[in-house]
Image (tube, grey):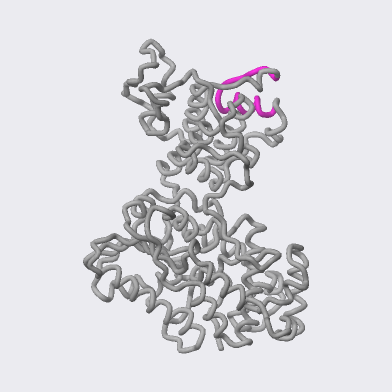
């Protein structure tokens, strides 16, 4: 059975089971898409929660900043955040020294960026909201010099003196909805700044700069019209890193305006499906994976699992080849900060929680049964596709089955994420590269049949009598090619507009 090339990467674009990762008890672990990277005893205020969560996704500042959200911010903390924000926006390294522990290095970086300087023993002094505003304003101005900073804007807060001529930063942040008042028509510039206020303002500053400079992720995103209802289509990458955040305002506003979210698998309401998948992932007949694959495959598998050091031999020997492949995939990706918790599906499902209904198109059972249905030869090829080392490709001059072509999995995913970030649907289609006219079992089950089912689901959303707007997320591989959902809709006469 001939398989499509880059099978590992294709699955990341088309199957939510790629979100599966296995811990010591073979539990399914999928993270909140906006996780604070370490459990903290204190949580931010409700008004700051989303800002703080999203800032953790953007991967701008050190994990140590998350927690003690009501505490007052010091100059050391403010300058550290300001430097890190500048480096994230520009890709530049301001100081080669460790500014998080070296006050002198931090002061030098702050002077370079903010034109401020304090003596060593002043770094623990608490800052005001105005101090924070001025630092963030200077960061934006230095990182994005082409923005228009000329303002004809009047502040109308009761605690702002018309005589103060040092309000350019305040005016800029207020006029761009980055800085809000504290109540009673006051801005509270002279108040001490809390950590949650600093984190919220930093998140907003970063989001603003990325959106205004047109660097937000564009995704594989379409609007479908011509039926009774409007449907938005977003092709997903199921495992990702911080590079695809924030997403373009067009995507986020379309989601906010939608009445329902449709996904392959509802990860937030799938206990029965998860239990079913966990049962099918392992051998229950007393055999182990070594008895179902070749000696060479098992030795490579065992070597890989030992190198990760997080699953015992007794545990990884029970995994079936297809679930073993997914486990290795997640462990490989996690080493490069690519993870299911940052995947497109998880992010939007978390946003939809308690806000709008989530419709399940396939479900865990469907996807689990799909892999269970493939024969042992295919399952071993799938496992081999994630085990093969890049250097082995150069050594092997013989033509091999495309399904087990050597590849650098993580680098390929990184390239795929970059294509998604820039909205390059053509490159994503090249990555899929399957023959829609093929009659082999894998192509029919994995692509053709699933594409047809998803297409029929989209048709039902377009033509029901609900007068709703639907936001549909399925693997990007199902959106593209001549057998994909987009082409099918176009052929049926619907208007499909790519938004980027």
Q: Is residue 195 above or below residue 255?
A: above
Q: Residue at x 71, y 35 (%)?
A: 98
Residue 408 to residue 65: above or below? below
Q: Tell me the quadrant of the picture where the C terminus can be found.
A: bottom left
Q: Is residue 419 visible?
A: no
Range drawn in magenta: 105-120
The residue drawn where x is 29% and y is 72% is: 460
Residue 216 position (above or below residue 315): above
Q: Is residue 48 left or right of residue 121?
A: left
* Residue 116 within the magenta-colored segment of the rendering: yes
Q: Position of residue 480 (x, y in %)?
A: 40, 71
Name the spot of residue 404 as percent of width and height, x first: 63, 79
What number of labels is visible? 0
Quadrant in which residue 349 is drawn: bottom left
Q: Is residue 495 left or right of residue 384?
A: left
Q: Is residue 447 magenta?
A: no
* Residue at figure coordinates x 38%, y 78% from the top left: 453
């Amino acid at each position: 059975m001939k398989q499509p090339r880059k099978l590992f990467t294709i699955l990341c674009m088309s199957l939510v089971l790629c979100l599966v990762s296995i811990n010591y008890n073979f539990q399914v672990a999928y993270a909140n898409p906006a996780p604070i990277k370490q459990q903290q005893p204190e949580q931010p205020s409700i008004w700051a929660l989303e800002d703080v969560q999203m800032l953790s996704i953007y991967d701008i500042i050190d994990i140590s900043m998350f927690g003690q959200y009501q505490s007052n911010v010091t100059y050391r903390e403010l300058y550290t955040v300001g430097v890190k924000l500048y480096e994230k926006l520009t890709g530049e390294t301001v100081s080669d020294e460790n500014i998080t522990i070296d006050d002198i290095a931090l002061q030098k970086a702050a002077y370079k960026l903010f034109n401020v300087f304090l003596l060593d023993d002043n770094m623990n002094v608490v800052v005001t909201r105005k101090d924070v505003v001025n630092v963030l304003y200077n960061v934006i101005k230095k990182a994005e010099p082409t923005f228009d900073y000329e303002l004809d804007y009047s502040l109308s807060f009761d605690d702002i003196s018309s005589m103060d001529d040092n309000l350019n930063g305040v005016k800029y942040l207020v006029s761009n909805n980055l800085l809000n008042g504290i109540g009673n028509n006051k801005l509270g510039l002279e108040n001490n700044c809390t950590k949650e206020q600093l984190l919220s303002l930093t998140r907003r500053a970063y989001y603003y700069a990325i959106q205004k400079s047109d660097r937000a992720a564009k995704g594989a995103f379409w609007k479908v019209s011509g039926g009774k209802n409007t449907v938005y289509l977003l092709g997903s990458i199921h495992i990702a890193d911080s590079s695809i955040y924030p997403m373009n305002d067009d995507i986020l506003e379309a989601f906010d305006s939608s009445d329902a979210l449709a996904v392959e698998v509802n990860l937030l309401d799938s206990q029965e499906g998860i239990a079913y998948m966990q049962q099918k992932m392992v051998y229950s007949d007393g055999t182990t994976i070594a008895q179902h694959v070749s000696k060479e495959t098992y030795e490579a598998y065992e070597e890989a699992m030992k190198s990760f050091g997080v699953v015992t031999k007794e545990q990884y020997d029970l995994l079936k080849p297809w679930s073993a492949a997914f486990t290795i995939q997640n462990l490989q990706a996690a080493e490069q900060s690519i993870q299911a918790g940052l995947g497109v599906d998880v992010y939007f499902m978390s946003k939809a929680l308690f806000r709008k209904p989530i419709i399940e198109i396939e479900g865990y059972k469907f996807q689990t049964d799909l892999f269970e249905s493939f024969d042992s030869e295919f399952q071993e090829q799938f496992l081999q596709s994630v085990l093969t080392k890049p250097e082995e490709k150069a050594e092997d001059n013989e033509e091999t089955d495309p399904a087990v072509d050597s590849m650098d999995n993580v680098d390929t995913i990184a390239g795929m994420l970059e294509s998604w970030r820039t909205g390059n649907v053509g490159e994503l289609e090249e990555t899929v590269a399957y023959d829609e006219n093929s009659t082999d079992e894998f192509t029919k089950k994995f692509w053709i049949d699933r594409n047809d089912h998803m297409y029929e689901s989209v048709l039902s959303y377009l033509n029901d009598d609900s007068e709703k707007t639907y936001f549909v997320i399925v693997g990007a591989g199902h959106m593209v090619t001549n057998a994909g959902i987009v082409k099918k809709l176009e052929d049926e006469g619907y208007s499909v507009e790519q938004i980027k």
